[in-house]
Image (cartoon, rainbow, N blue to C red):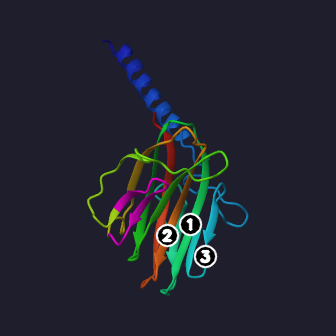
Amino acid sequence: MNSRTLRIAVCSILVLAICAGYVSAANNLLVNPSFEEVDEYGEPTGWEMYAASPMIASASISNEMAASGKNSLLCSINYALAGKKEAVLMQDVPVEKNKVYKIGLKYRKENFKETGPYLTINIYDKDGKEIAYDEPLIMKDHNKIDDPLLFWEDMGFRLVLKDTGSDIGEGKWVDHWVIIKTNEDTEFIHVAVGIKAKNPNNTGKIYFDDMYIEEVQ
């Protein structure tokens, strides 16, 4: 192979690599997956925000820390008070029937000692009703987790990433993902991400970023 042919081959590989990156990004079905776009009130476009007691457990878009870009979702427990504290963002994503999807996110804890983070996945029909799976259940595969306090729980009607007090993600970004299969009645994947803590004893923060839902089969 002469030098000219080699240069062409190398350039072709680089172009293909760049294009592949754009194709991968374009395949993310979530709207505003990295929370870079906010409205006039500072809330993330494409997401519905819910906080039962916003002064105690809050969700907001922050530029303090990000896995990529300039923003992330910040969920924090601001006061250690008894009761169920919840702050989440939600989005319904149109998907196809009988397809395989990979769903993932990155998060980072900062002095967060309570239960959390929280990611829940539901499968909805055309009327927005939750679909309950029989065997096999929703989950096909997930990332390896070396901590019994952090796990994926498949309840048939809901799939949840549960953290019951692990140290994973404290002071560093971690990546978790799960692979699911939709069924004949599926129209939407519903995702909710944030924190849910019962009777918190401490304050603390969790940052979320780079969420995705991608068709893989």
Q: Residues within 10 Å of mark 3 (few under 14, many from 20)?
A: few
Q: Position of residue 9 (x, y in %)?
A: 39, 19
Q: Nearer the viewer, residue 92 or 38?
A: 92
7 w.r.t. 58: above or below: above
Three-letter amino acid code at the position of disc 2 = Ile
Residue type, label 3: Ala
Asked whether residue 135 appears in the rendered view, the answer is: yes
Q: CA distance from mark 2 to mark 1?
A: 6 Å
Residue on which disc 3 sits: 52
Please identify the residue farthest to the front as the structure is shown: 134
Q: Nearer the viewer, residue 139 or 135?
A: 135
Q: Which mark is residue 199?
A: none
Range covered by the magenta-colored residues? 151-166
Q: Position of residue 44 (x, y in %)?
A: 64, 60
Q: Residue furthest bottom?
A: 81
Work out how far the residue at label 2 is from the one at label 3, CA to CA, in angstroms.
11 Å
Does the magenta-highlighted stretch encompass residue 40?
no
Residue 157 in percent (x, y) is at 49, 54
Q: Give the mark nearest the N terminus, 2 or 3.
A: 3
Note whether residue 64 is visible.
Answer: no
User: Is 52 placed left or right of 193 in the picture?
Assistant: right
* Residue occupied by mark 1: 88
Instruction: Determine which of the numbered discs, if any, sits on residue 195 in the image.
Output: 2
Residue 162 belongs to the span the image colors magenta: yes
Q: Name above or below for residue 142 compared with residue 90.
A: above
Kindly check if marks 2 and 1 are in contact, taking CB atoms under 8 A apart as contact. Answer: yes
Residue 46 is drawn in which quadrant?
A: bottom right
